Amino acid sequence: MRASQFHISTAKETPNDAEIVSHQLMLRAGFIRRLGSGLYSWLPLGLRVVRKIETIVREEMNRAGALELLMPSVQPADLWQETGRWEKFGPELLRLKDRHQRDFCLGPTHEEVITDIARREIRSYRQLPLNFYQIQTKFRDEVRPRFGVMRAREFIMKDAYSFGLNDNDLQQSFDKMHTAYCTIFDRIGLTYRAVEADSGSIGGAQSREFHVLADSGEDAVVYATEGDYAANIEKAAVVSQSTRDAPTAAQETVETPGVHSIAQLAAALAIPDTQCLKTLLVQGEETPVVALVLRGDHQLNEIKAEHLAHVASPLTMASDEQILAATHCEPGSIGPVGLTIPIIADTDAANMSDFVCGANTRGQHLRGVNWGRDLPEPEVHDLRNVVEGDPNPAGAGTLKIVRGIEVGHIFQLGNEYSQSMQATVLDENGKPQPLMMGCYGIGVTRLAAAAIEQNNDEKGIIWPTSIAPFEAVICPVNMVKSDAVKQAAETLYEELQTAGIDVLFDDRPLRPGAMFADMELIGIPHRFVISDKLLAHDEVEYRGRTDSEASIIARSQVLAQIRRSSVSPD
RNA sequence: CGGGGCGUGGCGCAGCCUGGUAGCGCACCACAAUGGGGUUGUGGGGGUCGGAGGUUCGAAUCCUCUCGCCCCGACCA
């Protein structure tokens, strides 16, 4: 591609509404343009990246035996009513009506449509296993779209759905997809981790998320210092090491005017926050509210809490009115002593003794409180997030926490959908069996952003060669004045094209500095400079995007140079 | 949904408080010089100041309403 025939639109300044580096660089380098909240156009340069990601994904899905198809974005409501998700999915589902006032939605995912296809197409176990996938635009009406294409409302996703007769089929499809996903992220060249994840409301046996590691990631990923245990923090189990000491203090009331938080409480009484008990009221399943208690330094794990029978799902914090009704006190001095609502304690909170908690009277706390003596023994569960240094629940070592961007999720659906939608096949005995399903997603457009989050510097983007918009660029110096440079550049351009290199020829009448700055911002892995000075010795200059300095190579060595030094992402 | 902030050429901003000819930088167009790290000079095009209403002789500026966007918040007990 000749730059003069392409559309390159770079900016020196960062648009003020872009928060994270990938969003800023994608805008500055001219990959995307915003149309509305969470809605982005992909300019030609950006689309090249998307297409390259899609190609890798498609190749690996095909290699794993999945079959590509394409389903509509607009889906009739009655399919969603069959599975109950028309009500359950909530406001993220963008609903619309056609001219006859019939209800539709823009597909945020395609379990219903694919299950409908399966129940019409698959009659016999002999057709199984099958795995269908598509690469398609999805729509989710996010509460708060942000970070550009990272959390957009409209985005491109690869979604695959496997169908089998039994658990064994499902496990095999799942394992195949797991392998294919690893190959995909390896080929793209990103640092990632596959982690255990919560399977969400759908249930299902196994669930793994693939996270690209980056500090700006919205998820916390936990991994063990020894062995290969890794999990989303939502899922990571706490192995409590605490034990309860015998009471030594008598319960007493202390005045704590103006204290509303654990931090304030610890400071006011000059005690560590580990000695404070945190009481959170959430909406209950059978009772209006339920108290969840944690050690002051611990954080509630909402997913774990939501799975408890007493707790309403989705987890909802109690309103101020509900808190007042249950405790006769305003938030700020709530504690479990004397409450008549169910009290559920995290393991470590249940092991505290002589602790401090709210007195359920404004401006007062209790100290020297002990379970079993001053209040009944609580129901005990794992309720908190793991913290760094917690023991590995799967073996030796301790846990570490890093930030991750979820770019893939695979999970075993089981027969939830096939049962509610009556998608059955006949088994070898001629008996109908519900299909066993798995589903497997990759956020294609998010992956582009994640790659930038992981690979950038002060000059701009550093694309892994696998998904760079162009693999190499030819930068002629002072071509307007030098026919020799022009000739040499044209020749090299021909040569690289013939060799199958995705090359950009920057034939714009720019000075070298401007040209270099553009190409570095855009993130092209290999750069070749041609000038009169170099041509005199039959040489060109090479610089990889991450090289600290340029090197001079023989003109004949250009192709070899590209093949030798593919930009390493880390 | 709650809280905060912002809407002024394509982008980044000033002007608003204290009403009086709409400005700057980048980008863009033309010409000239320059030609290995965002080059200079000269000239030029482009904005009914998000929208509606009001106050006023006069509104980007003051008031009311409205729309849009961005950020923070669902860990407060």
Image (cartoon, coloured by chain):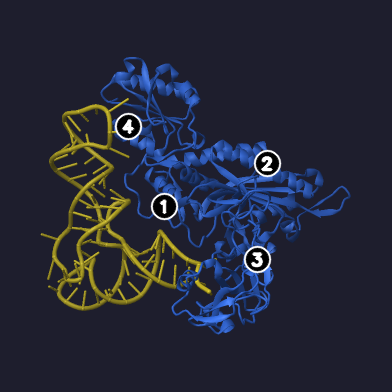
Chain colours: A blue, B yellow
**Residue identified by numbered label 1:** A34
- Which residue is at the far top? A537
Q: Is residue A308 above or below residue A75?
A: below
Real-space CA distance between mark 2 and mark 4, rounded to the nearest whole angstrom: 44 Å
Q: Residues within 10 Å of mark 4 (few under 14, many from 20)?
A: some
> Disc number at residue A508?
4
Real-space CA distance between mark 4 and mark 3, rounded to the nearest whole angstrom: 66 Å
- The subunit carrying tag 2 is A
Q: Is residue A201 left or right of residue A139?
A: right
| Residue found 66% across the figure and 77% down from its top | A342
Q: Earlier in the sequence, mark 3 or mark 2?
A: 2
> Disc number at residue A347?
3
Q: Earlier in the sequence, mark 3 or mark 1?
A: 1
- The subunit carrying tag 3 is A
Q: Earlier in the sequence, mark 2 or mark 4?
A: 2
Q: Is residue A150 above or below residue A489?
A: below
Q: Position of residue A325 (x, y in %)?
A: 57, 84
Q: Position of residue A511 (x, y in %)?
A: 28, 31
Residue A449 in sight: yes
Dot 3: element: helix
Label 3 close to label 2 by CB (< 8 Å): no
| Image quadrant occupied by the N terminus of chain A | top left
Give A414 or A293, whichever is nearer the viewer: A293
Q: Earlier in the sequence, mark 1 or mark 4?
A: 1
- The kind of residue on which mark 3 rests is Thr
- Which residue is at the far right? A429
Real-space CA distance between mark 1 and mark 2, rounded to the nearest whole angstrom: 34 Å
- The kind of residue on which mark 4 rests is Arg
Give A22 or A334, whichever is nearer the viewer: A334
Q: Is residue B47 left or right of residue A498?
A: left
**Residue identified by numbered label 2:** A66
